[in-house]
Amino acid sequence: MYEMTIMQRLKKIILSLFMVVFTGAAPAQESSPVYIGLDGEFSLLNSTSAQAIERGIRVALDEINEADGVLNGRPMKLLIRDNRSVPARGRENIRRFAEVEDLVAIMGGRFSPVLLDELDLVHELGIVLLDAWGSADGITEHEYRPSYTFRLSLRDRYAMPTMLQHALEKGAEQVGIIVPNTGWGRSNAKAALRYQEHESAPKILKPVWYNWGEKDMLRHYRLLLEAGADVVILVANDIEGSRLVHQLAALDGHEILPIISHWGVTGGKMVEKSGAMLHRLDFSVVQTFSLFTADPQIRDRVMSRAKRLLAIQRIEDIESPVGFGHAYDLTHILARAVDIAGTTNRAKVREALEQVHGYQGLTGSYPRPFTPERHDALKQEQVFMARYREDGVIVPLSPVHE
């Protein structure tokens, strides 16, 4: 009987030791991930925007997870789906992401038409849509309540005044605008019309519309030239933008006007596809963020991690930098919101995004990124004009970075 008691005690001790050892190894396995989805245009020819957004997310997640993740030790992980810049594919991706347990938000890609087409669906499903690039005003300016869309990116109502002011600084009296026949194009046309009401505004000629995929962009430019434009504002992505630049080589020198471009061109291989003609033009592009002018302490910390994770060496190696910076900051803001919510419940996370305070980010300082009344984190004063250097790197016009 005594021997049985000893044996029973030994079994209990061994079992206890086993449980201690096993439990000690368990937290990494038991801490189930919290997911963020990325719906981007990865397979679009020559595109660099989705890849830049992915890089920004990954650098931020590495920092977050090194600091014990969210919700007391749960790691955050990224799930990716490719929409090929096609709205129907984007909608299908949203549905797939919504089925993933503990996926708290989806970050969108470059194309405003894709994001605009997803608005009804994300509100129907009750899932947060984070915008790190798309600039159409309607992405956050809509009638859905409560709103599930949050943007840390450019808005057309900020971009157009900046571009038109730049045209004034060039002495323009009549400004021509080339816009795509999409939700993004219509958003910019409305923004131009609003700005026309300013006393200091130049005369804005009737917008010239084109369709995505058009081969002959020069004919649209000629219409503005014939109408007396001094400067052309180009609302385009890299494909149509590079086509226009190429085709301008056929014109005489006096027919080549300064081109002030929206930032869609920076989401792809604009310099590579435009060739030498780009650097013969007075070509500027609107931006919201530059690593060259970012807070040095934050930039150096981020770049140190980016070098390790992404196999890059210099600031210049980061293509489409606005996508990288915006996605990095949005991911950190989302992580804070998840901790404030204390849960992966999407409605609670949505509410918590409006409660984040005091975020000092790579792209700027955000005392309160979002409020119940405002789901746009960026301000007008963060918008500036930039240019392409000879090596293809985007730098602010002032100060000039050679």
Image (spheres, rainbow, N blue to C red):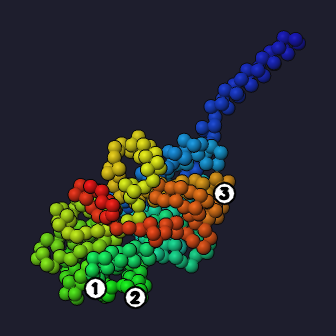
Name the residue located 82 percent from the left edge and 14 percent from the top edge. 6
Q: In the rendering, at what x and y percent does residue 294 appear? A: 42, 55
- On the rendered image, what quadrant is the N terminus found in? top right
- Residue drawn at 61 percent across, 60 percent down: 356
Residue 341: numbered disc? 3
Circle 1 packing at 10 Å, graded few (<14), some (14-19), many (20+), is some
Could you tell me residue 46's position as x and y percent?
A: 29, 59
Dot 2, how many residues are within 10 Å of its Cα: few (below 14), some (14-19), or many (20+)? few
Sequence-wise first label, 3 or 2: 2
Disc 3 packing (10 Å; few <14; some 14–19; many ≥20): many
Q: Residue 199 has which mark?
A: 2
Q: Quadrant of residue 197?
A: bottom left
| Badge nearest the viewer, 3 or 2 | 2
Amino acid type at circle 1 is Glu
Q: Seen in the image, is 67 located left or right of residue 117?
A: right
Position of 349 relative to 220 (above/below): above
* Residue 67 vertical placement versus 240 (above, below): above
Cα separation, mark 3 vs mark 1, equals: 52 Å
Residue type at numbered disc 2 = Glu
Horizontally, residue 8 falls left or right of residue 117, namely right
Circles 3 and 1: CB atoms closer than 8 Å: no
Residue 181 picture quarter: bottom left
Q: Position of residue 334 (x, y in %)?
A: 56, 57
* Rendering coords of residue 152 (x, y %): 49, 64
Closer-to-camera residue (93/156): 156
| Residue in the foreground of this view, choosing between 133 and 19 | 133
Q: Secondary structure at mark 3?
A: helix
Q: Residue furthest top?
A: 3
Q: Residue at x 55, y 44 (%)?
A: 65
Above or below, comparing residue 353 to residue 159 in the picture: above
Q: Which residue is mark 1?
A: 173
Q: Which mark is residue 138?
A: none
